[in-house]
Amino acid sequence: MADLEQFRSETRAWLEDHCPESMRTPMPEEEVVWGGRNARFPNPDSKLWLERMAEKGWTAPAWPVEYGGGGLDADRNKVLQQELSRIHARPPLNSFGLWMLGPALLEFATEEQKQQFLPPIARGEIRWCQGYSEPGAGSDLAGLQTRAEDKGDHWLVNGSKIWTSYADQADWIFCLVRTEPDAPKHEGISFLLFDMASKGVSTTPIQLISGASPFCQTFFDDVVVPKDQLVGERGKGWTIAKRLLQHERQMISGIGGNSALSGSSSSPENLAKSYSGEADGRIADPVLRDRVAQHRMNDHAFRLLMARAWEENKAGQESGHLTALFKYYGSEQNKRKFELMLETLGSQALGWEGEGFDQRELDTTRQWLRSKANSIEGGTSEVQLNIVAKRVLGLPD
C-alpha cells in the first residue's frame, strides 16, 4: 500500500509539472487528437501533451514497456486514471488502435507484428479504422462476403465495408475477410491489417442525420496485402473478431457513465442551471432537479458496476460476457442524457443553424441525433440483450 501511495504522489507531481493548463479544460470537438500520418494540432499544447504522455508510456499505461506502454499493473493504472480525472486532464490520444486493435494484437499477434504495430499506436503515429460491417452483414457480422484470395506471396482483397468510422482519414485498417468461402459461416474468416493508401482502396463518406460524416463506405478492388499482415491463424479470425468486439463494446459503454466527470458546461446539471435558473446553488426547477439527480445516480451506479467487474477481472474471474450488459446500458444511459438535455433546452433545441441559437444549443441538438446510433453501433441493443439473456441470465434459446 505504501508503494501505491508513493506512486500516487509521484504521478500527481509529474502531472502537475507536465500537463499544460489548456489540457485541463473541456475538449472541443476540433481539438480531439486522433494522431496518424496527417495529424493536426489546432492547439499546440495537444501535441506537447501527446508527446509527453507517449514518452512516459501513459497513452497505453497497461501495455508492456517493450511495446510502447507504461507497464503499469492494474492498481497503478487505476491510480493514474484517478489522478488524470482529478485535474480534468484531456485524453492525450483518441485511437481505435488503443481501444480495440492493440489489446487484440497483444493477445493474438506474432512478436514481429507486435513490435511493428504497437509502439506506433502508442505514440499516435498510425490512425486505424475498423473493417467489419458490410451492406449485407451488419448485426449478422459472420455473414460478411469481402474475400481475400491466396495468391502465393500475397492476399488479393475484393469487397466492401460500411459504417467504417473515419475511414477517409485513417492510415491503416484492421479488416475481416473471408479466406475460405466454402467453410461454415463462422469459419473461414481471417483478420488482416493493411495500409489504406494501398492501390484499390477507396472511401465514400456517409452523411448522418446529425449533419456529420464520421462514417464511410469503403471499397476494395484487387487490393494486394502482404502475407505477413495476417493476424492469428488463417480461417480463425472469428475468434479475434469476437474478442475485439468485447473491447469495442467496453469502449462504447463508457459514454454512459461520464456525465458528472466531464466538467463540461453542457452537462445535464450545468445546462439545467443555465436554462431553469439556480436557487442556493441548486437547479431551481424541482422536477428538473429530481430528473438530473436520478441521471447522476444512474451514472454513479453504472461506474460502480464497471469498477466491480474490473476488480473481479483482476482477481481472475471471467467477466467478458458483461461487456454486452455494459454496452447496452451505456448506450441507453447516453441516449437518456441527451433526451434530458433536449427537454431542458425547450424550444431552443429546435435550432439547426442561423440566428437565435447559440453554439451550445446547436451542438446539443446534433449530439442528441447522433446518440441514436449508440444502440446500433458496436452491436445492436437487440444483440446485446440476447447475449445477456443467454450468458448472464442463462435463459434457454
Image (cartoon, helix red, strand yellow):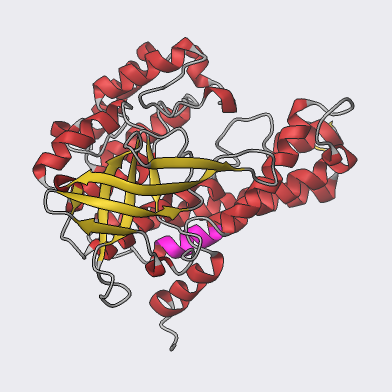
Query: For this rendering, which residue is in front, 346 or 278?
Result: 346
Determine the residue positioned at 17% across, 61% down.
234
Residue 219 magenta: no
Residue 328 inside the magenta-drawn segment? yes
Residue 102 image offset from top left, x and y in percent: 27, 43
- Evaluate whether residue 2 shows in this view: no
Kindly give the residue lying farthest to the bottom in the view shown.
396
Q: Nearer the viewer, residue 350 or 167?
A: 167
Q: Which picture quadrant has residue 306? A: bottom left
Q: Is residue 21 left or right of residue 366?
A: left
In the rendered image, the quadrant that contains the N terminus is top left
Residue 366 pos. (x, y %): 71, 40
Q: Quadrant of the C terminus?
A: bottom left
Residue drawn at 37 percent across, 67 percent down: 321
Quarter of the image holding residue 92? top left
- Could you say which is closer to the camera, residue 114 or residue 61? 114
Relative side of 329 to 85, left or right: right
Residue 272 location, quadrant: top right
69 to 314, vertically: above or below = above
Magenta portion: prevailing SS class: helix
Is 232 drawn above or below residue 15 in the view shown? Answer: below
Is residue 331 visible in the rendered image? The answer is: yes
Q: Position of residue 277 (x, y in %)?
A: 85, 33
> In the rendered structure, which segment of residues is drawn in magenta?
323-329
Please provide percent x and percent y for residue 271: 75, 35
Q: How many marks?
A: 0
Q: Residue at coordinates 32% horizontally, 31% vertically from top-left? A: 126
